Image (tube, coloured by chain):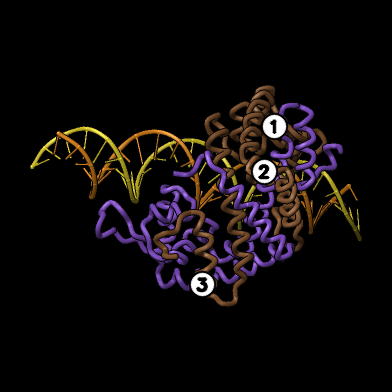
Chain colours: A purple, B brown, C yellow, D orange
Amino acid sequence: MSAQDVDFWSFVDAAVERARDRLPGIDPEAMRLILTLYRVTNMVVYDMESVVHRPRGWSYPGFRLVFTLWIAGPMEAKRAAELSGMSRQAVSALVGTLDRDGLVSKVPDVNDRRAVRLSLTTKGDDAISTAFATHNERETLWAETLSAEERDTLVRLLGKLGAREGVRRRR
Amino acid sequence: MSAQDVDFWSFVDAAVERARDRLPGIDPEAMRLILTLYRVTNMVVYDMESVVHRPRGWSYPGFRLVFTLWIAGPMEAKRAAELSGMSRQAVSALVGTLDRDGLVSKVPDVNDRRAVRLSLTTKGDDAISTAFATHNERETLWAETLSAEERDTLVRLLGKLGAREGVRRRR
DNA sequence: AGGAACTAATCAAAGGTTTTATTAATCGCG
DNA sequence: CGCGATTAATAAAACCTTTGATTAGTTCCT
C-alpha cells in the first residue's frame, strides 16, 4: 500500500507494516492493539463531547467530574481525583470553573481544615441527570454495533488489560 | 456496595448500579462498555506518556504527530491532521513547538501556496526511531496481559466499534 | 509541648485542544 | 476573464493538564 492511499483507519495497518520493516525487533501486534485502542477511544470521546457535552456548555472533563459526584455523592477533592482518574491539580482547576458556573459547591472540611468537600448544587444535579440521559443514548448508539456477547467479551478483555500491574498510575 | 468502598475500578460497577436505580430507562451495559473503554485507554496513555515520552521532553500529541510523519513520510499539514486524528488547528499549534525544537520542518508547498509541507528533520527522525522502540516495549508490556488469541479478538471488536457509521468525526 | 515529616490544596508556567474568526490562495463557473 | 465560493493555515480566547513549587494544616514521635 502506498502512503497516498492511507486514511485514518488503514493508517494502523500501514504503521504496523512500516515499523516492522524499519525496526525488525519490534512487536507489531502489541503496536496494533494499542494504536487501535487509542484511535477507537478518541473517536468515541470526540463524538460524545461534540454531540452531547459541548453543545450544553460542558467540557468532557467537566462532565466526568460532575458525573463522579452524582454517582458517589459528596466527597473530598482528593477522592474525586482518585475516582475520576484526574490529578488533584486538574480537579482543583476544574472545580474552579464548575463552581463559578454554579454546578459544584466547595466547602472547607469540618474535620480537616486543609481539605475541601465537593458536592453538586441543585443546578448541578439537574444538569447531570438530563445530560447523562443523552450521554447514555449516545453510548447505546456506539454499543449497538456489537452483539450482547461481543460486548461482554470486549468488557472482559479491556478489564484484563486494565488489571495490568507494574505500570505507572496517576498519583 | 457503599460509596466509601469504591476505588477507580469498582467505580464502574458502582456507577452502573446507581445509574440504573436513578434513571430506569438507561442502557447499563452500553454505559459499562464505554466507561471501561475510556478508563483503560486513559491508563495506558498515562503510563506511556509519563514513562516514555515526558522524560524525553515530548508530549503524547507531539509523539503522535512525529510518528505519523515517520510512518507515512512528508505530507501537507492537512493530511497530517487526518492521519493523526487531530484538528488542523491542533496540528498547526503543535508544529509550532516541534519546529522550534528542531524536530519537524515546515516548507511552503510549491503547488499550493496556501499549504505547508511537513517533514521530519534528521534530528526528528533519530528521535522518533529510538523513542518508538521504547514506546513499543511499553506496548508489549500492556499487550502481554492477553494471549495472542485474546489480542486478536480485542483488536477485532475494537475495529467493529470504530467502524460505527453516523457518528461525528473530526473535520 | 515542640519540631520534623507528611498531606491537601492551590499556584505558576508551559503546552495542547477547542471553537470562532481572519487571512490568503485557489477553484469554479458564467 | 473575473468574481463569488472554497479551502489551507493561523490567530485569539477559553479551558484543561502537566510538572514543580508553595501554603497551610495535621500527625507522629520524643
Q: Nearer the viewer, residue D4 or A130?
A: A130
Residue B52: give x, y in percent of width and height: 57, 33
- Report the residue marked by disc 1: B106
Relative to A80, is B143 on the left or the right?
right
Look at label 1 and name its amino acid. Answer: Lys
Q: Nearer the viewer, mark 1 or mark 2?
A: 2
Q: Residues within 10 Å of mark 2 (few under 14, many from 20)?
A: many
Q: Residue furthest bottom?
A: B24
Residue B145: give x, y in percent of width and height: 63, 43
Q: Nearer the viewer, mark 3 or mark 1?
A: 3
Q: Which mark is residue A129?
A: 3
Q: Nearer the viewer, residue A25 or D25?
A: A25
Q: Is residue B87 visible?
A: no
Q: Which mark is residue A34?
A: 2
Picture quadrant of residue A80:
bottom left
Quick one: SS at disc 3?
A: helix
The chain under label 2 reads A
Q: Which mark is residue B165?
A: none
| Inter-mark Cα distance, 1 to 2 | 29 Å
The chain under label 1 reads B
Look at label 2 and name its amino acid. Answer: Ile
Picture quadrant of residue D9:
top right
Q: Nearer the viewer, mark 2 or mark 3?
A: 2
Q: What residue do we see at 69% from left, 53% from top?
A: B170
Disc 3 and disc 1 on one polypeptide chain: no
| Inter-mark Cα distance, 3 to 1 | 47 Å
The N terminus of chain B lies in quadrant: bottom left
| Inter-mark Cα distance, 2 to 3 | 33 Å
Q: Is residue B8 visible?
A: yes
Relative to A85, is A92 on the left or the right?
left
Q: Earlier in the sequence, mark 2 or mark 3?
A: 2
Relative to B118, is B31 on the left or the right?
left
